[in-house]
Image: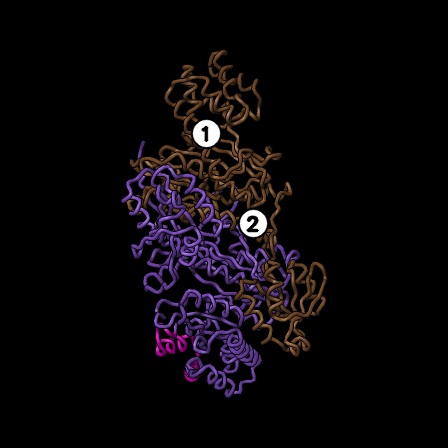
Chain colours: A brown, B purple
Amino acid sequence: MDIVKPSILPGFMELLPEDQILFNKIKGIIEKNFKLYAFAPLDTPVIEKTEVLLAKGGGETAKQIYNIESSTKDMSLRFDLTVPLARFVAEHYHELSFPFKRYHIAKVYRGERNQKGRYREFYQCDIDVIGDEKLDIRNDAEIPAIIYRIFKELKLDDVSFHINNRNILNGFLASLGVDSLVAVLRAVDKLSKIGQDKVLEILTDESIEKDKAEKILEFISINGSNRQILDSLKSLEIREENFVNGLSELETVYEYMLKFGVSEEAIKIDLSITRGLDYYTSTVYETFIKGYESIGSVCSGGRYDDLASNYTKKKLPGIGISIGLSRLFYQLKNADLIKIKAGSVADAIIYTMGDFDEQALSLAEILRKEGLKIQLMFEDMKFKKKMTYANNLKIPYVIIIGEDEVKENKYTVKNMESGEQALLEIDELLELLISGK
Amino acid sequence: MDIVKPSILPGFMELLPEDQILFNKIKGIIEKNFKLYAFAPLDTPVIEKTEVLLAKGGGETAKQIYNIESSTKDMSLRFDLTVPLARFVAEHYHELSFPFKRYHIAKVYRGERNQKGRYREFYQCDIDVIGDEKLDIRNDAEIPAIIYRIFKELKLDDVSFHINNRNILNGFLASLGVDSLVAVLRAVDKLSKIGQDKVLEILTDESIEKDKAEKILEFISINGSNRQILDSLKSLEIREENFVNGLSELETVYEYMLKFGVSEEAIKIDLSITRGLDYYTSTVYETFIKGYESIGSVCSGGRYDDLASNYTKKKLPGIGISIGLSRLFYQLKNADLIKIKAGSVADAIIYTMGDFDEQALSLAEILRKEGLKIQLMFEDMKFKKKMTYANNLKIPYVIIIGEDEVKENKYTVKNMESGEQALLEIDELLELLISGK
């Protein structure tokens, strides 16, 4: 038979078991926290109608989308989880209760140019709260607080939530009489990458007068403590409605993030983040790991006035955030930032010396009832090879059942890390394994 | 803006939150048990090279496969989880330890004709144990025992594992001098659907002499208790090697299934199941829900001598089983067979009467620390509407914090099912919510 070389396509992530266990542990922590905040699970099809996915219009997205070959249907793979959410909420509006809180952890697909740490198939972990007609601003503070809690549990304590409200800049520009909003947002978005001078150049190229361009730069460079920034903005005494509302919302989000338990040090009001090319309309977030800002934002999101305008006339404002888990995992591994333990595929493995299957089985049953992951070994292997096997799988304990053990109704347990060995009664064994989990 | 009708493609399953919670609960029970038996998670790309997916050859599979449009690569969506496993094990042979036990719960894709309860995207829940060169027969008994445990936890007590070993029939046919093996397997597979006469007709059409065809039918109709069937087979005194080995293996699998805790009533040695068109080589399983046999097998699998022969010259025997979860879920719902409770998106929702955000937040924190799913409500709604919201989401408890509660440092809790209301201290509240989970 012809042998086909076993390999996957470039740009796709596939992990070996040890890393997969770690990846799943992180994914599990994210999901657990989403659930603790009462988000409902959603699981939409990976394949959707192309016209639905591209309802908002083509552009970059259309170029990156994976289409399915079909003579009868136009179908493609989703490129994010927000468009399917919008479609779902519009489709099932009458079956849902609002505010509708949903989480979705799943793979999305983008035929991007292949580069390190960028994947064509990657996990997104999204939460969104969708309101019917309106949605309270406090939701904008709860969302990053949930992410904060997740990062803490992942032992990534040193994160910084950069928050802003697009209406502040919009209002400021309106007060200056500048209306080339998109151009400004685009330029401002690049500030951290290209520096003030270049941004100034772009702005004046966009036929914004030099003094106004300088004012814009000055504005987005307002800095200091969060409180100082808010005060500086207030002291500008701009009456423009967008500005006033944006500032008031930003202040509320900031104050409520503190109330929700996010530490002052983890919040950074940052007038330069605008997520210019996204569909956000007011609150925006980006999240950075301190000292690793070059990785980029590890979790971004914001508020959109009208989630599903491509699919329904209902006005459905929403707030959401997304962790790009595959990329984050790659970067955390690379930067050696993963401090949680992966755990092993098994808490213990049982080896028999002699015909003691029944004893092994009944012990395994007892241990599994306590939630312990237990492997039995049926293969005929030399003892040394069995120990190597346990070592390779990083199984912390080997339990040996032989003639002596059965006679005494005890179990020999070897700690594979320390090499220590002990003869234990069932209760002692249980205690050891449960404490070691 | 043009409105695009929000809808999904036919043949794709998408659930509303309440059903999704139930679906995920079932999926969670399956995954938990796979982990208790020390299977490692695997998560291969949904998109693979077409040549890898179709290495075994085309046929039905090639017709059903979803190809991705691409000018540079031949890529398709996986149609099962076994082919990716084979590719993975061959590719990473030197990085794995054998026996390699992996579980994989994920979506697969088949462009099947659209019919009720058949999906084009569906979850498979697979476990496989892969050996290097050899794999002990006791693995063939542990696999269905795991499924048995899962069905028990799903309160589907009345399942029946039909087990067989293909070598028994192969050996029997060899002893008769019949060599049109595939034709016989195909015919025998249809026995329960078309009856004995039709099968006899097909067999004789395949130029099998009538007396031999009758012997084949007689053979696969051997019945009685499991022990009786084994005894009947032994009493045939066939010396053909395949037959002897197959029978010995089947007996071992049967006896070990009992040892692994599967009840005698849940095991049915069934010489008519062969899974003729699959790649199994000895042990085969199908699983039926008693009284609902018409649903078909809800979980099938078996042993293959050589998992990855399309990708490597290494001999890698394996044993595996698969639950087609999307289809199973659809059928269980339809037959009203789901006896476990879905649970709600939240264990409780907190409503404030007045400006008591801080009290609500700190209560939510306390409750979430205990693993309780807690929703806060920020929206400005009439009290009646709030109660309707909790009712719609089937949240079992509403906690109310108003002036009196704050003064007394207590919480009003309403049981949404009974309508009972009580004023509780924090400890009492915790106890109530935890016990109600």
Residue A145 picture location, percent across and down: 48, 39
Which element is circle 1 on?
Answer: loop
Residue B88 picture location, percent across and down: 58, 55
Number of numbered discs? 2
Q: Amino acid at mark 2?
A: Phe
Q: Tell me what residue is drawn at x 56 percent, y 49 percent.
A: A23
Q: Would you name the residue on which mark 1 appears? A: A277
Which element is circle 2 on?
Answer: helix
Looking at the magenta stretch, what is its main secondary structure?
helix
Q: Kindly indicate whether the residues beneath marks 1 and 2 are on one polypeptide chain.
A: yes
Image quarter where the N terminus of chain A lies is bottom right
Residue B176 picture location, percent across and down: 50, 82
Q: Would you name the residue on which mark 2 appears? A: A23
Whether residue A311 appears in this view of the structure is no
Side of A270 where B15 appears, left or right: left
Identify the subunit bearing mark 2: A
Q: Tell me what residue is drawn at x 36 percent, y 66 percent.
A: B295
Which comes before the other along the chain, label 1 or label 2?
Answer: 2
Q: Nearer the viewer, residue A180 or B224?
A: A180
Above or below B190: residue A416? above
